[in-house]
Image (tube, rainbow, N blue to C red):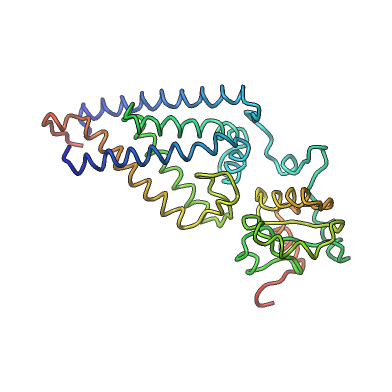
């Protein structure tokens, strides 16, 4: 991995790790409010709303620590990229539908305000970081350093 | 065509992701069992259920009831949606009290209201929660007759009831 790729790899994993840990905290503390936020997205059946509200914050927390501590990086970076893609899709879907709802991304409080194009831009940036990190993680580990060339 | 190494890496990513997911499921469910403010794993999210108060009474008001109060001028309608949506069109005579900015607008809207007057909050969409949150907030502020017209803007306009728009 060249120095600039290495810089991106470490920067991206630390930034995304911190973001995921921070994003999980308020949801952990307010499961009921987060369940409301999940419900407001109107994409899940009733049976999955509370389960999602209970499990997703833990998933974000564990992924955040995996990235910061550089553990299980292949699985963690892939999951972060998948999650960010889903989050982006949901935000775009609801903006297109004109739903006036709280993002619930970092806070369950209504003071966070409804999601808007800035929310989309912010998550777009995180998605780019996540996709780059996942690609680099697989690239870094697939033998490039041993001068192997893979045709993908 | 993916190389053998990449295929191995993807398999490893899948295994690690599965393990992380299992860990998150176990932690999420286990912690919910022991925390004091736990929530049920599965619950009813229907409009009737969401509008139920602790005593079993419903905050929801039916359209005919709301319309009757409107015709008799006996209720105040509060629009919980964003101000921009209110400006595009709202129930005739309604006041704007966006839930997301309730702290900013509360002092402008509420002082003129009698706390015994029925207050009907509304937003748009069957699952819109803004009006429900606003009604609960108003109840806490002493408005005993705060009610919610579920999916208010849509049902009101679908029944051709009086509205105000910028060109009307």
Vertical position of residue A85 compared to residue A72: above or below: below
**Quadrant the C terminus of chain B occupies:** bottom right
Q: Is residue B111 left or right of residue B7?
A: right
Residue B61: x %, y % from top left: 80, 51
Q: Is residue B57 above or below residue B125?
A: above
User: How many numbered circles are shown?
Assistant: 0
Q: Quadrant of residue A70?
A: top left
Tell me: A109 left or right of A9: right
Q: Residue at the spot x=41%, y=32% of the render?
A: A63
Nearer to me, A25 or A142: A25
Q: Position of residue A23 (x, y in %)?
A: 48, 40
Q: Position of residue B3 (x, y in %)?
A: 20, 30
Q: Which residue is at 22% across, 39% downward?
A: A6
Residue for point 50% across, 51% down: A93
Q: Residue furthest left?
A: A147
Q: Nearer the viewer, residue B43 or B32?
A: B32
Q: Nearer the viewer, residue A47 or A119?
A: A119
Near-viewer residue (A74 or A21): A21
Residue B69 image position (x, y, % from top left): 86, 61
Quadrant holding the N terminus of chain B? top left
For residue B91, what is the image quadrant? Answer: bottom right
Where A40 falls versus A57 (above or below)? below
């Amino acid at each position: 991995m060249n120095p600039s790729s290495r810089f991106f790899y470490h920067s991206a994993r630390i930034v995304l790790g911190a973001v995921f840990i921070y994003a999980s905290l308020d949801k952990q503390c307010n499961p009921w409010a987060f369940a409301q936020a999940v419900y407001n997205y109107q994409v899940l059946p009733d049976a999955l709303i509370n389960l999602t509200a209970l499990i997703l914050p833990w998933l974000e927390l564990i992924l955040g620590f995996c990235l910061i501590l550089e553990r299980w990086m292949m699985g963690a970076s892939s999951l972060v990229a998948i999650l960010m893609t889903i989050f982006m899709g949901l935000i775009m879907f609801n903006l297109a539908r004109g739903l006036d709802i709280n993002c619930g991304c970092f806070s369950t409080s209504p003071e966070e305000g409804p999601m808007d194009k800035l929310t989309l831009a912010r998550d777009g940036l995180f998605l780019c970081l996540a996709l780059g990190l996942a690609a680099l993680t697989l690239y870094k580990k697939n033998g490039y350093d041993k001068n192997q060339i893979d045709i993908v | 065509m993916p190389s053998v190494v990449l295929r191995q890496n993807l398999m490893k990513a899948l295994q690690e992701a599965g393990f992380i997911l299992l860990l998150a499921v176990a932690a999420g469910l286990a912690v919910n069992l022991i925390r004091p403010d736990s929530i049920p794993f599965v619950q009813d999210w229907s409009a009737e259920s969401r509008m139920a108060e602790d005593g079993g009474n419903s905050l929801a008001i039916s359209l005919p009831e709301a319309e009757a109060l409107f015709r008799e001028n006996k209720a105040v309608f509060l629009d919980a949606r964003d101000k921009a949506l209110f400006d595009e069109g709202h129930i005739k005579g309604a006041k704007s009290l966006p839930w997301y900015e309730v702290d900013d607008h509360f002092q402008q809207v509420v002082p003129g209201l009698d706390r015994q007057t029925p207050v009907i909050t509304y937003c748009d969409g069957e699952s819109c929660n803004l009006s429900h949150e606003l009604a609960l907030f108003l109840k806490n502020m002493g408005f005993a007759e705060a009610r919610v017209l579920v999916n208010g803007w849509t049902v009101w306009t679908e029944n051709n009831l009086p509205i105000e728009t910028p060109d009307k």
